Amino acid sequence: MLVQGEGDCMNILKKELKASLKAFFCWSVGLFFVVFAGMAKYTGFASDTSVAEIFDSFPKIVLAVFGMVDIDITSLGGFYAVDIYYAIICIAIYAIGLGVKVVNQESIDKTYEFIFSKPCTRYYILRMKFASAFIYITLYSVLNFIFSVGAISTLDIENTIFTSIVLYSVAMWLLGILFCTVAMFICAIIKNSEKGALYSNLVFLGAFVLGMLYDMVENGWIIRVFSPLKYFLPKEVLNDELNILFVCICVVFSIGFYIAASKLFERKDLQA
Amino acid sequence: MNLIFYEAKSCLKSTGIWIVSLISVFALMMIGAYPIYSSAIDDIMPLLANYPPEFIEAFGMDLENLFSYGGFYNFSFGYIGLVAAIMAASLSISVFSREKRSKCMDFLLTKPISRENIFFYKLVACLGIIVLTNIFYVGFALLSYNLSGDKSVSFSESALAFSGVFFTQILFLSLGIAFAVFAKRVRSVSGSATIFGFGAFVLSAISNIIDEENIEIIAPLKYFEPNSIFTTGGYSVLLIVIAVIIIALCLGAAFVKFCKDDARAG
């Protein structure tokens, strides 16, 4: 066993964090724009219950075209839920990019011989790289919480959805970690690094399309299992609850993918 | 000419897959979902009739337009345009960053062919693929519209609306070229293309939420949205002008940069 946690090795985490800082900053600006620009338009519609009632009776496909599946956009929570869906898309793409980077970066940059000949195990290096991705995903979710509370406080209305914002940020974090570990797993399994990135992004595109289908069909719970973007629906989160089943799916699959990715990566034939 | 064939050949397989996906999304929405949608509309029309017209107006929705074939296509275009944009971005980034990624820029630039011509040939290869894609897409869309039995849109209007995919792709092609030429390093073509596509998708959504006049300027996927054809008979002149300016700027700047840039080894 090699000595770990000393000298060069501890620096890996620092280096990784530093290398991803610029990208994190750019993604944060994007998040800021999505949350603030989106919420700025909420002026508080006159709440009319009959509106919600009439839309309840519509088929889902019609509501999908209206952009109002399970959402009452006249309420602050409903409006926030519409906006935050796009922040979730942002974190999913960002997390996939981070996951791809954890496994593939050194191969793409052709620097893998340099780093993997350091006196640390491969698994240790992968763990440090994952730790960096984990930290950034966590920070991103925290930022989402801060931006959301900030955006609503500029509106001069009472923040009635504080718990939902916390839950949405937790949901974002869970999905971010899930997408990150899925991407790690795919990149560890696929030899060619560009193909690994491609399939990871295709998985996201697939999840997105399934999410769109889920919005259009009635009783599409099977679709929902395969579409992480629909794990945490507005009607649940706005009732201050996260679907326990899907929280478990996120946690179990994240851990599973992470373990599988590290096992595979230890034996991966690294190539430039 | 060799260059054009080489680029076209290396994109052949992915182009085939993209054409199939574009047509599948169209088929899924307009052949699969639209009949369900229009029958659902028939069910809720009597419900809506119970409400005064002011109520519907208050919702800011043009129901007649929304409930038509064109209205549903406009909704679908959000997704079709997304796929088209990702395709165009990945195509152009792949073609224009090929040597940068495999670190063989010097190999290409020492060939007896001027840089201007390299840029030009690569551009021709990309444009050829986009044109080919849209021959399939627009052809399929027109055929399926004619077979759908819907007569609410004239032939020229529907052809123009379906060509929105072509114009959108040209726009994203230019953006992708500018990115590929100016970026110091392109690590992942698919990652960058996904960011381009979904970035534009999110911008469209935000501009829908903001809903101010001319806010579409921030959302490239809305420049050639079919809605304006069904409501006003053509694309918005302002947005066309902006799209042309963006295309000219991106291609012009990328051309100058490509011809003057230092060929880096790594």
Image: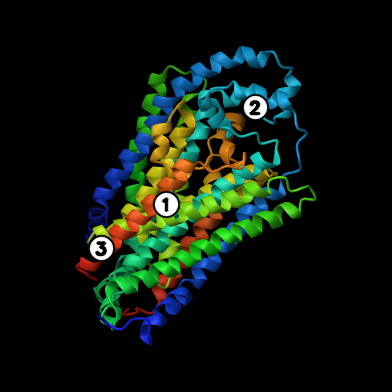
Crowding near the residue tagged with mark 1, few <14, some 14–19, many ≥20 C-alpha atoms within 10 Å: some
Residue at point 22% right, 70% down? A270
Quarter containing the N terminus of chain B? bottom left
Relative placement, left or right, of A217 versus B187 is: right
Q: Give the chain letter at badge 1.
A: A
Q: Is residue B122 or residue A211 the one in the foreground?
A: A211
- Label 2 neighbour load within 10 Å: few <14, some 14-19, many 20+: few
**Residue B81 pos. (x, y %):** 46, 42
- Residues at marks 3 and 2, CA–CA distance in whole angstroms: 56 Å
- Both marks 3 and 1 on one chain: yes
Q: Closer to us: mark 1 or mark 2? A: 1
Disc 2 target residue = B62
Give x and y (percent) for residue A101. Answer: 37, 66
Q: Is residue B237 visible in this depiction of the protein? A: no
A223 left or right of A162 in image: left
Q: Are marks 3 and 1 in contact (CB under 8 Å)?
A: no
- Which residue position holds label 3? A263
B253 or A89: nearer the viewer: A89
Is residue B182 left or right of B47 when viewed as pictured? left
The quadrant of the rendering that contains the C terminus of chain B is bottom left
Foreground residue, B202 or B103?
B202
Answer with the quarter of the image where residue B262 lies.
Answer: bottom left
Q: Residue furthest right?
A: A156
Q: Residue at x 65, y 54 (%)?
A: A148
